Image: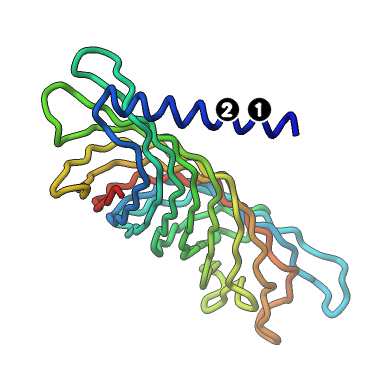
Amino acid sequence: MKYLRHLLTGTCLLIVSHCVAAAASGTEAGVYIGLFGGVGSSSSTGLQQRGEVYLNPPHSFPTLPIDAEGPMNSNQGIPVVGAHIGYEWNQWDIAPGWGLRPAIEVEGLYIGEHSPFGVMPVDPEFLGTQYVSVPMTTGVVLSNAVLILKTPYTDKLFPYLGFGAGAAFVSIDGSNSTNPSEPGINHFNSAPDASDRAFALQLKAGIKAEVYRHTYLFLEYRYLSVDPTSYCFGSTDYPGVHLPTTTWDVNLGRLEYNLFTVGLQYKF
């Protein structure tokens, strides 16, 4: 009960302080929602493919370990859509005519299909080179902290900066691993789809303009970083054509996106 009294007292004081700040600054706190879309690019990253070939099927041994590793190319023109819901506090006056309004958001992004492609030398070297493509989509859920700047020059335009952290869900559909020495063979053919999740960070900067009462148009740039992910693809299964293999473990390096979005925001 003592803890509850302290919590209620603190909550009341916080509400009162917000009301006083609103009266002093002439701004109002409130909930807002937004929808946005745009395009972006991904930077190059690295990929490693590991597995074993059974040299004496159907017995397990001996096996030939395979390790292919190399860079994946960058991708451009990647579509992105998303939505957020947030709460904006009253303005903090920092100088005559200048102010900051803090906000918090929960945001969801969907990054459309793009296909990093890699040329990966194989160890042992006599097996040549693997050519690997991993068509992927990425969903991201983030919690953002945002600071909105009020300047003395206009009451309609507001620059802002944001930082967010959350989780990314990477889905690969229809992966392909080929070798010129084995035409027509996809080494992931028995199960070419896989997914993983990873920690994600975001930095964003933008500007929003009030185009109608409580309605804002915003333009922004986002840098999104997704930690390395790991996948397990199916074994190579071409009876009578290719020796059987184990499943393939694939490690994908950090994904980095540069995204440019435009959207509409409504503040209640």
Question: Where residue 151 sits: x, y (%)?
Answer: 19, 23
User: Which amino acid is tagged 2?
Assistant: Gly
The residue furthest left is 153
Question: Where residue 61 sits: x, y (%)?
Answer: 88, 68
Q: How many marks?
A: 2
Q: Residue at x 62, y 61 (%)?
A: 127
The image shows residue 246, relative to residue 12, as above or below, that is below
Is 42 or 26 nearer to us in this picture?
Answer: 26
Question: Where residue 166 sits: x, y (%)?
Answer: 54, 45
Label 1 element class: helix
Please state if 120 lies on the left or on the right of 60 as rendered.
left
Report which residue position mark 1 lands on. Answer: 6
User: Which amino acid is tagged 1?
Assistant: His
The residue furthest bottom is 240
Distance between the alpha carbons at the discs numbered 2 and 1: 6 Å
Give the quadrant of residue 153: top left
Report which residue position mark 2 lands on. Answer: 10
Q: Residue at x 52, y 31 (%)?
A: 12
The image shows residue 141, relative to residue 59, as above or below, that is above
Which quadrant is the N terminus positioned in? Answer: top right
Marks 2,1: beta carbons within 8 A: yes
Q: How is the image coloured?
A: rainbow
Label 2 element class: helix
Give residue 146's mark. none
